[in-house]
Image (cartoon, grey):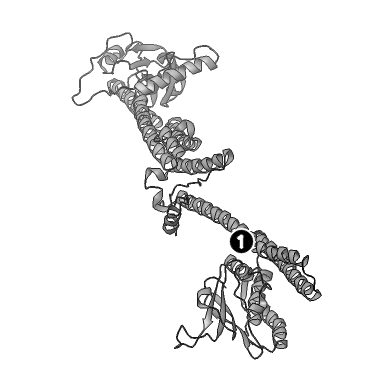
């Protein structure tokens, strides 16, 4: 339908661009729309709120995900747990070194060096730079530490390397956060404790025989882990070993892990923005074209009476809602122009039909002034009366036809029994036909047929068809009304044995103001009845057509046996 309408429009100078015309020659595209596309480019964020929303919402989801990962900090918890477990093992091993040197059964005094040389033992324990060991006696006095004495050189281990990966992004964000914290937070007293103070806080619990571990930040903000574990001689605690980790070691590991997350986040943002731009271009750009086409048409109609019609882009090839929207808008525009054309044609037809009786009236009135005989004056008055009634009937039918569209839209459909409605009409109109000497036959199903529609309007259709059939019949002719259900449709047929319909008129009988009547009935019908009937039936999703009744083997040039009108309605 789109292709055929487009071809017809182009052939006749019409301008509703449908189908392949939109993607065809450049001249088929509105100049204003082409200029707007050239200015817009691939995607213009400053002109497309929809594109900005798509990108913003996609980034928000990504930001929430990464902030949640950084806030929950699962990798830090895992690293802390591993570091605490390793430090406890190291402290207990150090305590085992002292316990292995204690004499069995003899009293030990670590402070006096009785039974063990604590300073030499401390000096023999290898610790990485930055980690310190402290030795306390049962009275919580510090006996020795690696911070003041000699340290054993750390043996290099092949294959063990430090993580030297850069943390540029993490350091940059940390500096920003630190700057914000300094601005919004109040300056307070330094709460960072030294490593020795951390160990001293755990001495009472360690002297009672329990290993303790703690983590705090020092004055520089670096995290330090401290462990205090007892040295036992049998069941008696003779001292405490305190071990502290390298300040900020865990922070460096966490920074490396965060750096990887942030790097992936940056890559994900770039990919998300790129995909969002592609998505926005496939959504926002077509919608912008549709809106621009409608706005161009509106502005043209507002500025001047332009013969150019609105060109809606053909996006029906897209299997999504935008394709549906494009098809719907194109259909609306085509229907609107069809309605405008129909109204223009209707106005022209009304003007033509009214001129005929007016011309006859003018001629009769002019003649009435000149004739002298009463007999001629009576004939002229009859002509005037006939033309006045013809005008009255014509104006009434035109008024009904002009209101029909709006009434079909406003009235609410309801379920009703089509068989009962047609039966009542046929019984009433059949009486009028029989008075004329016409045999009236009713052949309807015994079971009801429920349909949805406007009962009064459909009744108007069947009244028109039956009265038309009766008007073409003479004494001895017959009219038959019958109905049959066929799957999801019902057929209602009105037949007569009148003169039939001229073959060339079969395609014209449903046109406005067309009337094929005997000479004696000239002027008694406006020619709008069948046109109105067709409009009502099609508004209900049905069809109506006319045909002549002929024997199956009859020649098409032979005289018909009568006329048949068929109405098909959905059930």
- Identify whether 106 is placed above or below 390: above
Quadrant where the N terminus sits is bottom left
Q: Is residue 189 left or right of residue 532?
A: left
Q: Position of residue 112 (x, y in %)?
A: 34, 10
Q: Is residue 444 left or right of residue 86?
A: right
The furthest residue to the top: 148
The furthest residue to the right: 374
Residue 199 or residue 412, whichever sits in front: 412
- Identify whether 281 is placed above or below 509: above
Q: Which residue is mark 1?
A: 349
Evaluate whether residue 203 shows in this view: no
Q: Is residue 531 left or right of residue 73?
A: right
Q: Position of residue 426 (x, y in %)?
A: 68, 82
Residue 124 or residue 487, whichever sits in front: 487
Q: Position of residue 510 (x, y in %)?
A: 57, 70
- Identify whether 510 is placed above or below 448: above
């Amino acid at each position: 339908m789109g292709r055929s309408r487009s071809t017809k429009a182009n052939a006749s100078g019409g301008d509703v661009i449908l189908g392949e015309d939109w993607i065809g020659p450049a001249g088929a595209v509105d100049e204003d729309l082409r200029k707007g596309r050239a200015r817009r480019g691939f995607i213009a964020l400053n002109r497309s709120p929809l594109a900005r929303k798509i990108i913003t919402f996609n980034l928000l989801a990504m930001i929430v995900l990464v902030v949640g990962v950084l806030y929950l900090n699962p990798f830090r918890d895992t690293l802390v747990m591993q570091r605490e477990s390793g430090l406890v093992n190291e402290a207990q091993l150090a305590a085992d070194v002292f316990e292995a040197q204690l004499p069995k059964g003899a009293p030990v005094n670590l402070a006096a060096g009785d039974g063990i040389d604590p300073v030499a033992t401390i000096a023999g324990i290898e610790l990485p730079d930055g980690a310190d060991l402290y030795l306390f006696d049962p009275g919580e006095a510090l006996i020795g530490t690696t911070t003041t004495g000699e340290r054993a050189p750390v043996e290099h281990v092949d294959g063990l390397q430090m993580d030297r990966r850069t943390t540029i992004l993490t350091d940059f964000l940390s500096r920003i956060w630190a700057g914000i914290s300094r601005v919004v937070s109040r300056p307070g007293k330094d709460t960072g404790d030294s490593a020795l103070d951390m160990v001293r806080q755990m001495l009472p619990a360690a002297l009672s025989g329990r290993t303790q571990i703690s983590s705090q930040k020092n004055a520089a903000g670096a995290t330090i882990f401290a462990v205090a574990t007892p040295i036992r001689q049998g069941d008696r605690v003779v001292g405490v070993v305190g071990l502290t980790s390298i300040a900020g070691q865990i922070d460096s590991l966490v920074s490396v892990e965060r750096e990887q997350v942030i790097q992936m986040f940056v890559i994900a943002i770039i990919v998300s923005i790129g995909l969002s731009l592609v998505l926005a271009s496939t959504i926002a750009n077509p919608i912008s074209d549709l809106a621009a086409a409608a706005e161009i048409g509106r502005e043209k109609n507002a500025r001047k009476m332009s013969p150019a019609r609105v060109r809606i882009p053909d996006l029906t090839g897209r299997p999504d809602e935008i394709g549906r929207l494009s098809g719907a808008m194109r259909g609306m525009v085509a229907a609107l122009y069809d309605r405008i054309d129909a109204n223009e044609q209707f106005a022209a037809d009304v003007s033509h039909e009214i001129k005929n009786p007016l011309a006859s009236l003018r001629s009769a009135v002019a003649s009435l002034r000149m004739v002298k005989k009463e007999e001629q004056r009576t004939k002229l008055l009859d002509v005037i009366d006939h033309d006045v009634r013809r005008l009255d009937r014509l104006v009434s039918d035109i008024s009904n036809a002009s209101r029909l569209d709006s009434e079909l839209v406003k009235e609410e459909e309801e379920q009703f029994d089509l068989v009962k409605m047609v039966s009542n009409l046929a019984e009433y109109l059949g009486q009028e036909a029989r008075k004329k000497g016409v045999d009236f036959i009713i052949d309807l199903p015994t079971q009801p047929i429920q349909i949805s529609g406007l009962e009064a309007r459909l009744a108007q259709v069947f009244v028109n068809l039956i009265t038309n059939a009766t008007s073409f019949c003479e004494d001895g002719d017959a009219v038959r009304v019958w109905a049959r259900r066929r799957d999801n449709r019902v057929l209602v047929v009105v037949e007569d044995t009148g003169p039939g319909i001229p073959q060339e008129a079969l395609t014209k009988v449903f046109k406005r103001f067309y009337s094929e009547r005997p000479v004696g009935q000239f002027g008694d019908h406006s020619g709008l009845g069948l046109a109105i009937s067709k409009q009502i039936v099609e508004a209900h999703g049905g069809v109506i057509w006319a045909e002549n009744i002929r024997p199956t083997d009859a020649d098409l040039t032979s005289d018909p046996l009568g006329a048949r009108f068929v109405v098909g309605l959905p059930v």
